[in-house]
Amino acid sequence: MKRRPPRKPSTLDPYLDYLQQRWDQGQHSAKILREELQTQGYPGHYQRVKMAVAPVRRGLPLGEPRDRPPSPREAAR
């Protein structure tokens, strides 16, 4: 069965440690986290930060790709 290729590096990858540190300190607002990252040189958008912290809100690790089940098309192949 053919699997999805590995995830490409993101512009947010260099800042994941900082995001985790700030999350652990109690800052859970993606908007504020993005503003803090911008002062450090992050060129990306709010949506990418919001999507990065979404798994953390559910108790999953930050920045680790999640395995997804195969789509119906992939399963049929």
Image: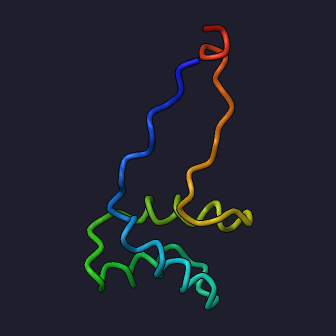
Q: Is residue 52 above or below residue 42?
A: above
Q: Position of residue 52 (x, y in %)?
A: 52, 62
Which residue is the extreme one toward the bottom?
25
Which residue is the extreme one toward the front?
1
Of residues 14 and 54, the one nearer the viewer is 14
Q: Is residue 16 above or below residue 50?
A: below
Residue at 53 percent across and 20 percent down: it is 2
| Drawn side of residue 61 relative to residue 20, left or right | right
Image quarter of the C terminus: top right
| Drawn side of residue 75 relative to residue 36, left or right | right
Q: Quadrant of residue 27?
A: bottom right
Q: Position of residue 40 (x, y in %)?
A: 30, 84
Which residue is the extreme one toward the top?
77
Residue at 52 percent across and 73 percent down: it is 30
Q: How is the image coloured?
A: rainbow
Q: Position of residue 71 (x, y in %)?
A: 64, 23
Q: So how many labels did they put on this image?
A: 0
Q: Position of residue 6 (x, y in %)?
A: 45, 41
| Drawn side of residue 22 relative to residue 76, left or right | left
Q: Quadrant of residue 56?
A: bottom right
Image quarter of the N terminus: top right
| Drawn side of residue 56 relative to residue 43, left or right | right
Residue at 36 percent across and 54 percent down: it is 9
Residue at 61 percent across and 13 percent down: it is 73
